[in-house]
Structures are given as structure tokens and as C-alpha cells.
Image (cartoon, rainbow, N blue to C red):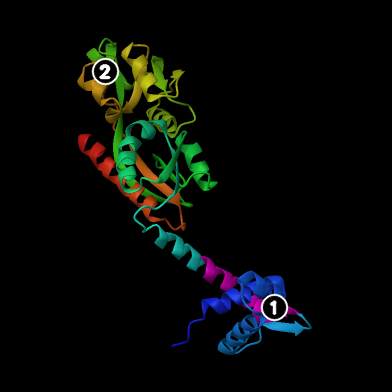
């Protein structure tokens, strides 16, 4: 079995490669020039190759040294990442968690998650950025948020998606709406006004696709950015909302809204918690995802 490379030798190697000077490398690592020289000589002996050309007081990498440099940097970066993850095992870790999510997730999923999360990580700062699924995933890919809670996007090549639950979209109407008295036919949707959060949302795209496959084009919309506003307009009979029952459970149980299945087959959605593929997660992030999964199970059990 080959002997493992000493991390202190690698650190000295990287520092000397960057500075080109034993004196400067010693200053940066708070070591004597003799200690730096000994570390490099030991590394060269271990690898059985010369890593530097020495020219007076300056040094330059050999071909072997240039080959080793990126590997050495990766090794130390991995070790640093491991230390970062292990540091979160402290009983009271500090840090910041940036969450991107839809407005529905912010209102109905995250409050319970955050309540339990803060019990375990009271010193953690949380920032929530709301937006539709496409915008939220874009922020995740640009590293503007750490975790995204949204509908499952169409493209997931760059993501690690953790499924939390599935739901089904239905019509939500006022008890006085004609559809509450008689289930609608699919073609009647063409003349109805629909209340939607945003035409840029994945939910809107799924709904449009569903009706287009049935040969029906939706024409009339009232566009709002809030689940609460959507429900209020539906209660007033100003249009039809298309949403999952769990978003309007209180209104349905009190008789303020009536839920109706879509006329032609079910339209189901999958909610996920997403992170960038390959990015290591610390303990608070893994805990957050686990809590989202628990809340998702509760929602799904009520569907």
C-alpha cells in the first residue's frame, strides 16, 4: 500500500508554487525557510520526482510539479470542505440558510419546517426568497439560494431533487357558482375566467398543457401573486381557481369554497426540495430537507 501524502507537505508545496520564494512561503505559513525546504525535499523523496527548478533565491515548477499542483489543491479543498461539514456537528452551529421557494410553499410548508428547524439550530439565520418555480430554480443554479422548495422542474440535470409529496389540482369555486351545482364539461372551460398566480409559473404551464391536450384553449384570466387573493376572488364568484385542496382546506371545510375534480383525468404535481448536484450539504441543510419531507407526508396523508 502506497504511503499517503502528508497534508503539511502539500500545503508547503502549494504555497511555494504560488509564491516562487522559500522566504515568502515561510512567512505565509509561519515557518522557517529551513522547514519549508525540508517539507519540499521530503515530498520529492516520497514521490520520487523533482518538483521545482531552483534558480538562486527563486524556484519554478518542473513538469511534474505542474502536474501535481491541481491535484494538491483539490486535496486541500476537499479536506477544508470536510472540516466545514464536521464543524456543523457542534451543538449550536452558526450560519445562514438561503431558501428559494414558491409563495404557496412559503405560506403552507415552511412555517412548520422553520419552527422545528429553529429548535435544533437557534443561532442559524434564515433568508427566504419567494418566486415562481422557474425563477427559484434559476436562483439556485446561480448560487443565489442554497435550497429550493418548489414544483419539480422539467430540467433536473444540474439538480439533486428530494421528493416531498404529490398533490392533485382541482377546480375551486364559490358555492354559488354554476359549476358547484352541476359538474362542468371540459369545453365549458373555454368561456370561464380563471384566477391564477402568474402566467410565468410552472403551475400555469401544467394547466395550459392539460387543457390543450383536451382540445380546449383557456382565454380569460385574472392574474394574482398570492394564494390568499386567489381564494378570496374565487369565494366572491369572480372566477375559478385551479389549486390543490391542501391550499384551501379551511375554506373547503367551512363551505366557503367547493372543490371539483377536473373533467378529464387527474392533473398531479410533484413537490421537491432541490440542491445543486455535487454540492456537499452540512447538517442544518440536511435537517431542513428532512423536515420538509416530514411536512410533505402530513400534507399527502390529507389529500
Q: Position of residue 204 (x, y in %)?
A: 43, 29
Q: Considering depth in this image, is 38 or 200 the residue closer to the camera?
A: 38
In the image, is 303 to the left or to the right of 92? left
Question: Dividing the picture into quarters, in which one does residue 222 lie?
Answer: top left
Q: Secondary structure at mark 1?
A: helix
What segment carries the magenta color?
58-77
Q: Secondary structure at mark 2?
A: loop
In the image, is 214 to the left or to the right of 81? left
Locate the C terminus by quadrant: top left
Q: Position of residue 191 (x, y in %)?
A: 40, 14
The magenta stretch spans residue 84: no
Residue in the picture at 48% in, 86% down:
3
In the image, is 23 to the left or to the right of 216? right
Q: Position of residue 138 (x, y in %)?
A: 52, 42
Checking the image for residue 233, the label placed there is none
For disc 1, the marked residue is: 22
Residue in the picture at 29% in, 36% down:
167
Question: Dividing the picture into quarters, in which one does residue 269 lie?
Answer: top left
Q: Position of residue 178 (x, y in %)?
A: 28, 11
Q: CA distance from mark 1 to mark 2?
A: 76 Å
Residue in the picture at 25% in, 37% down:
299
Locate the N terminus by quadrant: bottom left
Checking the image for residue 257, the label placed there is 2
Of label 1 and label 2, which has the lower sequence position? 1
Residue 8 in view: yes
The magenta stretch spans residue 76: yes
Asked if the residue under mark 2 is in contact with the one under mark 1, i.e. CB atoms within 8 Å, the reply is no
Amino acid at each position: 500500500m502506497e504511503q499517503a501524502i502528508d497534508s503539511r507537505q502539500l500545503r508547503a508545496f502549494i504555497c511555494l508554487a504560488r509564491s516562487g520564494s522559500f522566504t515568502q512561503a515561510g512567512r505565509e505559513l509561519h515557518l522557517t525557510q529551513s522547514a519549508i525546504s525540508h517539507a519540499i525535499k521530503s515530498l520529492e523523496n516520497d514521490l520520487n520526482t523533482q518538483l521545482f527548478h531552483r534558480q538562486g533565491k527563486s524556484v519554478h515548477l518542473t513538469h511534474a510539479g505542474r502536474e501535481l499542483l491541481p491535484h494538491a489543491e483539490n486535496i486541500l479543498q476537499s479536506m477544508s470542505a470536510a472540516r466545514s461539514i464536521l464543524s456543523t456537528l457542534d451543538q449550536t452551529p452558526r450560519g445562514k440558510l438561503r431558501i428559494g421557494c414558491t409563495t404557496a410553499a412559503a405560506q403552507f410548508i415552511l412555517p412548520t419546517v422553520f419552527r422545528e428547524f429553529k429548535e435544533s439550530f437557534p443561532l442559524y439565520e434564515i433568508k427566504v426568497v419567494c418566486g415562481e418555480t422557474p425563477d427559484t430554480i434559476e436562483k439556485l443554479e446561480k448560487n443565489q439560494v442554497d435550497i429550493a422548495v418548489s414544483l419539480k422542474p422539467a430540467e433536473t440535470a444540474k439538480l439533486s431533487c428530494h421528493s416531498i409529496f404529490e398533490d392533485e389540482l382541482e377546480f375551486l369555486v364559490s358555492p354559488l357558482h354554476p359549476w358547484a351545482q352541476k359538474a362542468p364539461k371540459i369545453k365549458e372551460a373555454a368561456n370561464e375566467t380563471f384566477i391564477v398566480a402568474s402566467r410565468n409559473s410552472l403551475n400555469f404551464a401544467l394547466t395550459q398543457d392539460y387543457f390543450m391536450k383536451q382540445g380546449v384553449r383557456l382565454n380569460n384570466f385574472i392574474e394574482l401573486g398570492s394564494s390568499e387573493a386567489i381564494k378570496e376572488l374565487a369565494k366572491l364568484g369572480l372566477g375559478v381557481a385551479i389549486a390543490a385542496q391542501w391550499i384551501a382546506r379551511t375554506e373547503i371545510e367551512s363551505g366557503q369554497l367547493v372543490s371539483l375534480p377536473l373533467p378529464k383525468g387527474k392533473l398531479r404535481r410533484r413537490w421537491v426540495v432541490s440542491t445543486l448536484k455535487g454540492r456537499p450539504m452540512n447538517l442544518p441543510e440536511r435537517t431542513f430537507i428532512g423536515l420538509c419531507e416530514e411536512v410533505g407526508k402530513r400534507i399527502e396523508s390529507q389529500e
